[in-house]
């Protein structure tokens, strides 16, 4: 069984590390070909994850990054098409909702190579979000759709995806949180900040970073936080802040993006998370921290339903109210995202399908 995994962005490195570790340990007959599209290329957005999460060096690096969505997707598609013809994988495995996800799925589907999609069925119900188009199209060319939640399963059913392709397996990020929690590492710079309690913040979604008005609203809201805000600054956000000539309020301590093990430490030790990241919203829940989400919608609706996540858009007043209203008490995560065995379930299903295809 030859499996081609296509990844390119920070959250995909973490998810793939979690799956590939179990694959290598428990399925020795499988051969994984790892393809890095190059979508994220900075050392602290890419290399650090390969180093600290023990991800093998990619078999192929496509070096595509830095362009527009159309340019990136098109270049990846062309290169992946050639690679799939050369490598002849039995399956192509893609994660999440980035341009790398769509390019991997589309290249494989056009060559009649079956596609498995991890994190299938999540929807913002907002087609202006770049990830939404990638998700919908990937789900509709995939052969195996691994949905993390029942909500994701229902979204797929409503779009007419046949039941036999959909498997609710829980969330691989939950598996990752269980495994990496014990390896969490305090950032070297943390003590020098001279703070104890803090709000952890991340901002990177295009609908925020590409809009000066929204960014100003977010910064004004964070300026009123009674606790210091630690902000590992995404390169795109840094670039946009400079372009809009926006300055950061004194409450915010800016640091470089951190590796995953340091991020897990920050998430486990903060008082509250404020973020527009899908992954970080869930991790806040895994580590029992309340979350204020800088957006008008979330794909992780169950967090809002159970009251541990509030959506505040990018509006100063709503952010201030969200930070003060959110119940600051910690809580126990209680199984919204599976039992921590989603990697096992994905691989079992993949191998059952692979052997039944081979038997035909
Ligand atoms: N993350 C990290 N370092 C950081 C910020 C985030 O390791 O400085 C991790 C975070 O813990 C989560 C993942 O990156 O696992 C989320 O990625 P991102 O926010 O870029 O994407 P999204 O989840 O919104 O797709």
Image (spheres, rainbow, N blue to C red):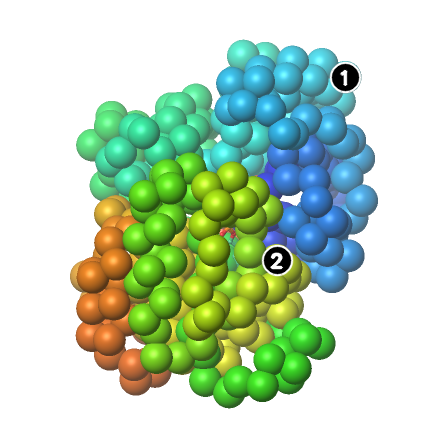
Q: Ligand 1 within 8 A of label 2's CB?
A: yes
Q: Measured from the top left, where is residue 274 in percent x and y?
A: 38, 64
Q: Which residue is mark 1?
A: 86
Q: Could you say which is closer to the camera, residue 131 or residue 253?
A: 253
Q: Residue at x 54, y 23 (%)?
A: 68
Q: Measured from the top left, where is residue 209 in percent x and y?
A: 43, 43
Q: Could you say which is closer to the camera, residue 349 or residue 69?
A: 69
Q: Measured from the top left, where is residue 307 in percent x and y?
A: 21, 68
Q: Could you say which is closer to the camera, residue 200 or residue 11?
A: 200
Q: Residue at x 20, y 32 (%)?
A: 158
Q: Mark 1, mark 2: which one is toward the viewer?
A: 2
Q: Residue at x 63, y 21 (%)?
A: 76
Q: Considering the numbered disc 1 on the image, is that residue within a helix, a strand or a loop?
A: helix
Q: How many marks?
A: 2
Q: Is residue 26 visible?
A: no
Q: Measured from the top left, where is residue 20 in percent x and y?
A: 67, 50
Q: Is residue 7 visible?
A: yes
Q: Residue at x 78, y 31 (%)?
A: 60
Q: Residues within 10 Å of mark 1 (few under 14, many from 20)?
A: few
Q: Is residue 159 above or below residue 42?
A: above
Picture quadrant where residue 293 is located: bottom left
The mark nearer the N terminus, 1 or 2, is: 1
**Quarter of the C terminus within the rendering:** top right
What is the number of the mark on residue 173? Answer: none
Q: Is residue 324 above or below residue 163?
A: below
Q: Which residue is mark 2?
A: 257
Q: Ligand 1 within 8 A of label 1's CB?
A: no
Specify whether 28 is left or right of 4. right
Q: Residues within 10 Å of mark 2 (few under 14, many from 20)?
A: some
Q: Could you say which is closer to the camera, residue 5 or residue 76?
A: 76
């Amino acid at each position: 069984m030859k499996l081609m995994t296509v990844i390119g962005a920070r959250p995909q490195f973490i998810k793939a590390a979690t799956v590939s570790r179990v694959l290598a340990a428990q399925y020795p007959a499988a051969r994984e070909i790892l393809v890095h599209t190059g979508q994220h290329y900075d050392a602290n957005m890419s290399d650090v994850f390969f180093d600290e999460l023990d991800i093998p060096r990619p078999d192929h690096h496509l070096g595509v990054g830095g362009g527009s969505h159309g340019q990136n997707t098109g270049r990846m598609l062309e290169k992946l098409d050639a690679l799939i013809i050369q490598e002849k994988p039995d399956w192509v495995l893609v994660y999440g909702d980035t341009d790398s996800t769509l390019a991997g799925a589309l290249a494989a589907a056009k060559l009649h190579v079956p596609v498995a999609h991890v994190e299938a069925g999540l929807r913002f119900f907002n087609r202006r979000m770049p990830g939404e188009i990638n998700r919908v199209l990937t789900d509709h060319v995939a052969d195996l759709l691994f949905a993390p939640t029942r909500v994701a399963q229902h979204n797929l059913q409503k779009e007419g995806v046949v039941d036999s392709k959909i498997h609710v397996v829980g969330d691989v990020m939950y598996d990752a949180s269980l495994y990496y929690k014990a390896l969490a590492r305090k950032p070297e710079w943390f003590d020098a900040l001279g703070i104890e309690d803090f709000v952890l913040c991340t901002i990177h979604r295009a609908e925020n970073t590409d809009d000066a008005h929204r960014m100003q609203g977010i910064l004004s809201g964070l300026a009123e936080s009674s606790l210091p805000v630690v902000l590992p600054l995404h390169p795109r956000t840094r670039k946009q802040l400079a372009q809009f000539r926006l300055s950061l309020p004194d409450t915010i301590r800016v640091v470089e993006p951190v590796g995953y093990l340091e991020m897990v430490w920050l998430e486990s030790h903060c008082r509250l998370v404020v973020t527009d990241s899908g992954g970080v919203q869930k991790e806040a829940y895994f580590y029992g921290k309340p979350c204020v989400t800088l957006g008008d919608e979330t794909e992780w609706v169950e967090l809002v339903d159970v009251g541990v996540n509030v959506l505040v858009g990018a509006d100063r007043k709503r952010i201030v109210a969200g930070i003060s209203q959110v119940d600051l008490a910690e809580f126990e995560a209680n199984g919204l995202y599976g039992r921590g065995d989603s990697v096992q379930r994905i691989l079992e299903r993949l191998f059952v399908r692979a052997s039944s295809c081979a038997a035909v």
